[in-house]
Image (cartoon, rainbow, N blue to C red):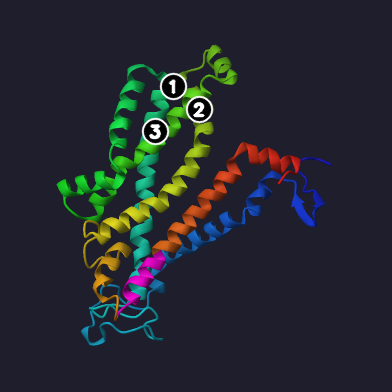
Amino acid sequence: MMRSEITYRFRRGVISLERPHWRLFQQIPMVIGLVLIVGLISVGVFAPLLSPYNPIGVDLHHNIVSPYWQHPFGTDNLGRDVLSRVIYGTRIDIPASLFIVGISVLVGVFLGTFAGYYGGIADKMLVGTMDAFLAFPDIILALIIIGALGPGMSNTVLALSFSGWIRYARVSRGMTLSIKEKGFVETTKAAGVSDSYVITRHILPNVMAPISTLATLHVGHAILSIAGLGFLGLGAQPPMPEWGAMLYEGRVFLRGGWWLSIFPGLAIMVTVLAFNLLSDGLRDFLDPRLRRNYKTGLH
């Protein structure tokens, strides 16, 4: 039977699918994470249609109202609908985290691949810079930068991107050092092709598998960092409906207004969990050892 055909093999009472890309659907946690992410992004895109109230509209006659049918998530101390603010928060936290990860990936992969491929002084400078950055936790560097530039969402994104590229530079540099010694790369270089051809056709395709897994995991970390800085009052500023800022505003009403912190916290938890599930599934899906196990029927 041809390899491209779907072959059903009954093993241990379970039907397994032979076609490789069907393994994607065998990763149930990854599918759950992907569905959650698509749902969260859809909520952000259609926030004006889904939000029952203006997220920054003040109604002091209905402040600190517990959840009921008109306000399923209750209202805050200014009478603003918490559900509407949580919905609009997806338009702030998720795009900001994706922007942070995107900048970090571009800068880190470029520097790591360049230094790993060419070596020499560029590699030594990159390693020294990474060692200097790794001496401080990401959040400490972000606090220093925001302290110098001032609070705000744009400065938060800049600060977290400033330190986020390190992890990608380390991974891409290590992968490049390993791949450039492979026989197929040496053969391609001996054929007289340019370095840019070798990097784009042979180095980067092999580097992007671990980078994809790392980037997906980094999104969840970036959301937590954004929320943490927002909770400290250094991220998004009022009245912007950012999840971390909402936690900060609701901290003084925990006894009588538990919903002010519970629902933004749940939004953060579900979003981070979704990206972590997707990252774990991608890691298993892209692992060549697991690919061999699937092909041979080992589980």
Q: Could you say where residue 50 lies in the image, as x and y percent from the top left?
A: 41, 73
Identify the residue position indicated by label 3 in the image. 169
Q: Earlier in the sequence, mark 2 or mark 1?
A: 1
Q: Residues within 10 Å of mark 2 (few under 14, many from 20)?
A: many
Look at the numbered disc 2 and give the secondary structure of its residue: helix
Identify the residue position indicated by label 1 in the image. 117
Q: Could you say where residue 40 lies in the image, as x and y percent from the top left?
A: 45, 63
Taking the image as shown, residue 203 lies to the left or right of residue 298, namely left
Magenta residues?
257-267
How far apart are the two marked residues, 2 and 1, measured between alpha carbons? Answer: 9 Å
Look at the numbered disc 3 and give the secondary structure of its residue: helix
How far apart are the two marked residues, 3 and 2, measured between alpha carbons? Answer: 14 Å
Q: Could you say where residue 176 lies in the image, as x and y percent from the top left?
A: 47, 26
How far apart are the two marked residues, 3 and 1, measured between alpha carbons? Answer: 12 Å
Name the image quarter holding residue 62: bottom left
In the image, what residue occupies the spot 52% across and 54% down? 277
The amino acid type found where label 1 is placed reads: Tyr
- 154 versus 88 height, above or below: above
Q: Which mark is residue 174?
A: none
Q: Earlier in the sequence, mark 3 or mark 2?
A: 3
Q: Which mark is residue 203?
A: 2
